[in-house]
Amino acid sequence: AQKITQTQPGMFVQEKEAVTLDCTYDTSDPSYGLFWYKQPSSGEMIFLIYQGSYDQQNATEGRYSLNFQKARKSANLVISASQLGDSAMYFCAMRDTTTGTASKLTFGTGTRLQVTL
Amino acid sequence: DTGVSQDPRHKITKRGQNVTFRCDPISEHNRLYWYRQTLGQGPEFLTYFQNEAQLEKSRLLSDRFSAERPKGSFSTLEIQRTEQGDSAMYLCASSPSQAGGPPEQFFGPGTRLTVL
């Protein structure tokens, strides 16, 4: 079974600084996908970035980049130039392929990021 | 805006009552998912539809829970004889299934259920 571990319950970062949110995963499947979602206090899950297990390069989307280290089974999210609006819960997730339905997501417990002035 | 919508956004009910939630996915998406999120946790998978077929159900989905997607468009999630442990945010998501399409699931705003 897939498992996602996020060991940082909460993080603080100063505005305009960069921050790294940790995510490790466990799977025996050679083909998988890793996702990061942002959940503001309003509750909606907002997709940020995706990394496929066979992708050669680390994914980037604007201020978001994914530091994918396959051998270490880690997929850390890096947010550059933090903004006050980045304050939210951040979830790492993996696409489950073991049961043949290649779409179910398994989420970690999340990291609450607080951006300060 | 043509994102995923959910109704109601909030529901307060008494223990033992039945509740029904509705999800309208993005119109061209044929995959629809339900997740449950309790306080301090990440979303947990409940069930998944491809068009009108329910292809997978989690062990979390007890006999009191039933989900339908009768015409392959909107979906409903019903909880019978609600218990206090059912209090949670119920999230719906949708995605297309064609190869080469975006890999992510698009989430709705959720329905927050409180069982008194």
Image: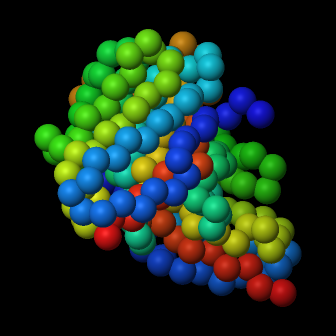
Q: Is residue B102 visible?
A: yes
In the rendered view, tell whether residue A21 sits above or below residue A60: below
Q: Position of residue B63 (x, y in %)?
A: 14, 41
Q: Residue at x 60, y 38 (%)?
A: B5
In the rendered view, tell whether residue A117 sits above or below residue B108: below
Q: Residue at x 26, y 53 (%)?
A: B17
Q: Is residue A63 left or right of residue A40?
A: right
Q: Position of residue B111 (x, y in %)?
A: 49, 51
For the residue pair A10 and A60, the one nearer the viewer reads as: A10
Q: Position of residue B91 (x, y in %)?
A: 47, 47
For the residue pair B30 and A65, the one nearer the viewer reads as: B30
Q: Position of residue A116 (x, y in %)?
A: 77, 85
Quarter of the image where the C terminus of chain A is located = bottom right
For the residue pair B81 and A115, the one nearer the viewer reads as: B81
Q: Is residue A105 left or right of residue B3?
A: left
Q: Say which quarter of the image contains residue B39.
A: bottom left
Q: Residue at x 75, y 46 (%)?
A: A61
